[in-house]
Image (tube, helix red, strand yellow):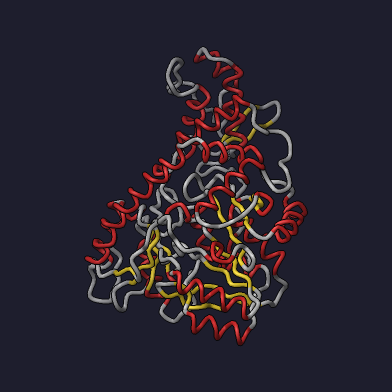
Amino acid sequence: MTVPLLNWPIAAGVRTPLVEQIVSHCVEQIRHRRWPAGARLPSIRQLAAHYGISSFTVHNAYERLNAEGWLRSRPGAGYYVARGDEPGGGLAEANAAGSRLAADVALMRQTLQPAPGALPVGCGTLPDGWLPEAMLRGALRELARQGGALTAYGTPQGYLPLRQQLAARLADWRIAAEPAQLLLTAGASQALDLVLRLMLKPGDAVLVDSPSFYNFHACLRLHGARLLPVPRTRQGPDLTALKHALAEHRPRLFLTNSVLHNPTGTSLSPPVAHRVLQLLAQYDCVAIEDDIYADFAEPGACRLAALDGLERVIYLGSFSKTLSANLRVGFVAASAERVAALTDIKLITGMSTPQALEQLVHRLLTGGQYRRHVDALRRRLAAAQAEVLPSLAEHGCAPWATPEGGYLAWVALPDGTSADALAAAASRHGVWLAPGRHFTLEDDADRFVRVNLAHALEPRFWHFLDGALGAPPGGVRDA
């Protein structure tokens, strides 16, 4: 079969570039199976002549479709539909279930590869419409005009002006760090991986909050660590449990969120923070303080790194939550000696980080727009919390604690309701939830789900809950 030339919606003189028009039309036809796998597209010359456009334009569109897996080129024979459903052609993804880490990354895989049209109430990122795409595009254009670093390697520790700006930002949070004490990374995940490579050997014990971010667990298991959960209270780690675990197991590290803890949204109180540092010093344990939600917190939020001076604390941050999940720029703040060692590991395992992205973040941080954007986000999130939490209560769902900011809540389901069962029912209605077992090994894990307050504003979520939790007490029916 040859794809017909008639009725392609291609028009010059409109806002959408011709290449985008061709690509969008082809993707729509293939996705909806109007063009079967193996169908031959019109030749570049035929399509260009029929619609009076440049052959170069058609070639660029076809090559983009080929690169994205929608088409396959056959030398001397033209372009053919690769398959009739999803991009990637015959290059299906590897069998995820066959990996030994499949269970550890199941929720992350769902976040990064959601089902088409799924409403991600369980995810850890803001909706696309809440993030500053226009601001990012503008900064990219400006960077391109002024000549960013697009072809050379970045410097080992990362773009110096950004490290200087980060040092000034940390000073606002009473964290004293010189640019030499900062290492730029490909997001906070790489930052954590580098720290674990430096600090751990297989079999070492590591303390983690319970509940805590599921990818913490996966990273620690990947490095062969023994995970020791410390129950989280509304003011921080349970001090009695922390002292007992330190005395009995002599762990090397304590991995925690001090500010807007994931998944509870609570923050460390000053008295608990002081006692935590005393215990860590007593038992020679180092804290890794992940602070990726920093910009959503109140200005006076308590951080271990501010009290410690980066002697017994290694501090991590990033901009994935406020700017873009696809903008992988993070950092480590630590003692100069540790940063020097971490830089060597970064060079060995990943060389440098993209300086163009670091320049982009620097431009955004110093332009004034970023602060206005974050202030607007905080107001919008406060409104979302005020709307979502009472609505959850009407369905018998109560937050374990009222979040102190940000967009995550750790929500207890009605008595007898299974988080796993609720998540399974939700998935059949295009809603995905994050059951408690991904965040904690406690016996009551199946009572909880993590809820993203921004995504929970969507009516589709409430329509599902109306049906699913309208069953007899403790039951979940397929709405």
Residue 165 place in picture, x, y as percent: 58, 44
Residue at figure coordinates x 52%, y 57% from the top left: 174
Is residue 103 found left or right of 394 in the rendered image? right
Image quarter in which the N terminus is found: top right
Q: Is residue 127 left or right of residue 287?
A: left
Q: Is residue 254 left or right of residue 383?
A: right
Please give the count of numbered marks on the rendered protein: 0
What residue is shown at x 70% (from left), y 29% (from top)?
A: 75
Question: Compared with residue 206, is residue 81 higher up or lower down, i.e. above or below?
Answer: above
Q: Would residue 424 be seen by someone viewing this image from the given angle?
A: no
Q: Closer to the camera, 33 or 460? A: 460
Percent position of residue 116, x then y: 43, 48
In this rendered view, identify the residue nearer to me: 282 or 382. 282
For residue 191, above or below residue 436? above
* Residue 350 in sight: yes
Task: Name the foreground residue: 63 vs 255.
Answer: 255
Residue 43 is drawn in which quadrant?
top right
The image position of residue 364, as x and y in percent, is 52, 38
Q: Residue at x 46, y 16 (%)?
A: 12
Near-viewer residue (174 or 257):
174
- Residue 412 % position (x, y): 34, 72
